[in-house]
Image (cartoon, rainbow, N blue to C red):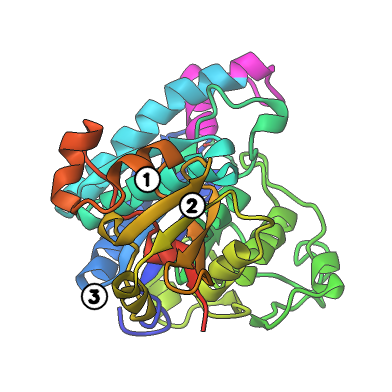
Amino acid sequence: MNGRLASYKRIVIKIGSALLVDRATGLKRAWLTSLARDIAALRAAGHEVLAVSSGAIALGRTVLDLPQGSLKLEESQAAAAIGQIALSRAWSEALDTEGILTGQVLVTIDDTEARRRYLNARATIGALLRLGSVPVINENDTVATGEIRYGDNDRLAARVATMMNADLLVLLSDVDGLYTASPHSDPSARRIPTVEVITPEIEAMAGAAASELSRGGMRTKIEAGKIAVQAGTAMMIASGLFEHPLRTLDDGGACTVFRPSSAPVSAWKSWIAGQLEPAGTLTVDAGAHAALRTGKSLLPAGVRQVGGRFQRGDTIAVILQDTGREIARGLAGYDSDEARKIAGRKTGEIEAILGYAPRAAMIHRDDMVVGP
Ligand code: GLU
């Protein structure tokens, strides 16, 4: 894998239901095997890979032999419960053949939209990557209902990609890109190779079509694109209808590339910097300030004083003891009560003070904007 995908280190791959599940015969095992081989090749070339896999409801329906047409909510949730366990097993077996561990992550919308939960989800998925596994992520369809769900995995995948600072999101689907019009009904429709900016014209091209098995159509893919590119993650829409879809994509196969609008980190950090009033302050010494300026995280040892009441995940300001000036802003790694207990303490002492294994930092460098 040293072609088109070579420059993207962390890659999220979203797999649509129609690729994994055949209404009549169930799971498309040979296809999944070929995808697992592609994932192994990417990892061997130094990439980190996360999968967002649909297919729970579709697979559950097939296992239960439920009739075509729409299901009642509790039926589709029951189908998801039965399908998800089969889906996870299929992923785990396919990746295990390549010597890769699988970690199943089921998320609800709060896990990416509420900051505290977001930090937890991100820490867990980050740990799964560090441990060398491929996280396989889906919405927790058995409990998510109505307005508390994503509903489609295109946007879920985009949220996961931006949450994890991924360099690239690949949406594998039953179409090989965005077309100027529906390729099924308009012979003059042509595929757009690159989208520099998602304009209203681009959005208008998406229409609303969805295939029978999946919830998203081109519209949710464009919405996913908006989420991704704003945060600095590139996106590709490519076909997964053939085996080895990632190898094909890497070799230059058909797709639509959505260019990211800026560097990955800066969009996330500008979101932090743009937060309204900080909920509290951490006053630090000159040594900690020097460390922050070289891009380090803020450790408890460097904190002299904790001001205000805040919760883990709230935006807080970092104040320089000598001048009282705000030198940085970031997301709190600890609640203010905990922060007070561990301020000034060495990392090694913290577990004994708090009674549980400490987090990486008071403010992690990925969650902090340091001023000039
Ligand atoms: N989470 C759903 C499932 O696994 C799929 C949602 C979608 O099709 O985008 O069945």
**Quarter of the view holding residue 335:** top left
Query: In terms of sequence position, does the residue under pointer 3 or pointer 1 come before the other?
Result: 3
Question: Label 2: which residue?
Answer: 15
Residue 59 part of the magenta-drawn span: yes
What residue is rendered at 33% in x and 65% in y?
A: 297
Horizontal arrangement in the rendering, residue 317 relative to residue 342 (left or right):
right
What secondary structure is marked by label 3? loop
What residue is rendered at 24% in x and 73% in y?
A: 46
**Quarter of the view holding residue 166:** bottom left
The amino acid pointed to by label 2 is Ile
Q: Quadrant of ligand 1?
A: top right
Q: Which residues are magenta?
A: 54-75
The amino acid pointed to by label 1 is Val
Residues under labels 3 and 1: Cα distance? 20 Å
Residues under labels 2 and 3: Cα distance? 21 Å
Confirm or deny contact between disc 2 and disc 1 (CB under 8 A): no
What residue is rendered at 45% in x and 72% in y?
A: 167
> Is residue 69 shown to the viewer in this render?
no
Please state the horizontal and vertical placement of residue 355, each as a whole percent of the image: 21, 30
Residue 111 part of the magenta-drawn span: no
Confirm or deny contact between disc 3 and disc 1 (CB under 8 A): no
> Is residue 104 shown to the viewer in this render?
yes
Mark 2 or 3, closer to the camera: 3
Residue 155, compared with residue 215, is above or below; it is: below
Question: Label 1: which residue?
Answer: 136
What residue is rendered at 34% in x and 58% in y?
A: 303
Horizontal arrangement in the rendering, residue 28 relative to residue 139 (left or right):
left
Q: Nearer the viewer, residue 28 or 336?
A: 336
Question: Label 3: which residue?
Answer: 45
Residues under labels 2 and 1: Cα distance? 10 Å
